[in-house]
Image (cartoon, rainbow, N blue to C red):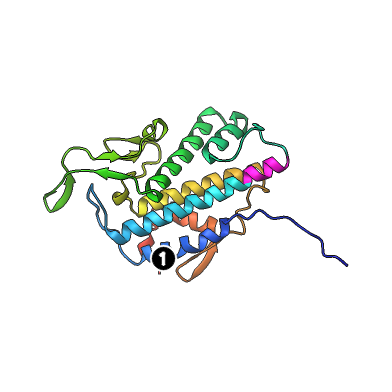
Amino acid sequence: MDEPKSGIYSVLIDAWLIPIGILWNELSKSKMRTANEVQTSAPENGNSSAIIVLSIHLLESALHRTFCVLKDTTKLRDAKENGRSMSKFFKNQFTIADFSNENERAVYCDELMELFAIRNALAHNHIWKATIEHKESELSFVGGPEMLGYSSKDFDARYDRTTRKTKRLGLNIFPRRVDREDARITIITVYKILRFLENKNKDFISTAPLRIRIGNRRISLEDFICELGDSSYSPSSEK
């Protein structure tokens, strides 16, 4: 007797959580040092940046799955949507009717755009040119740093040129300044969007089975997010 057949989408949502957990545990081994405006430590910067990039890859996997489910069930709002830009797809697919109000929709769309902005800045290593000096035993900029070789109207609208942080989430866009707080905010925001998708349709994603290994514990992604959102929690306290 033939076995029943089933289809799958080859997304990496759960797979990304393995290296994210490993990197978070590595980050947890060291205490967070006070960073200057130019940079944080190399281990802090490297592990945090990798966590951010992989977390947004995870989100992108979920969005691609959402796109495929909608396309296969002919429920795409725009039949010409090609799925090349997940931020554009999200904005076009989910209208005000899917949110409590227009402001909530704007928040989700802005946060998603900022996540992709920092992912691109790190994954493609956007280059900045700056003059620096040692001031009171710390590195500081002389004048403002200048981004070289990359600019777009949409990207430029996402960050404050004075702080070099995204306007809504406050994520460092200057690559060497990225630290674990940026990673923490990114993971929490990614989970927020995952839950939004899940609440729309569990065929898009189900977060309940997702697990991550933190220290010696294998816990649910939801529990990990709760720990990250607790102001008394810090990765350096994790054993």
Q: Is 144 in the magenta?
A: no
Q: Is residue 125 above or below residue 5?
A: above
Q: Residue at x 17, y 50 (%)?
A: 139
Judged from this view, the residue extending furthest toward the bottom is 216
Give the residue drawn at x 85%, y 65%: 2
Percent x, y of residue 167: 37, 36
For the residue pair 28 and 92, the one nearer the viewer reads as 92
Viewport quadrant of the N terminus: bottom right
Question: Which residue, given by chain and number where applicable, does mark 1 sit on?
Answer: 25
Residue 229 on image: x %, y %: 44, 51
Is residue 69 covered in magenta?
yes
Q: Where is the C terminus found, in terms of image quarters?
A: bottom left
Question: For residue 33, what is the image quadrant?
Answer: bottom left
Q: Which residues are magenta?
A: 66-73
Horizontally, residue 46 falls left or right of residue 76, namely left
Which residue ends up furthest to the front in the rendered image? 149
Magenta portion: prevailing SS class: helix
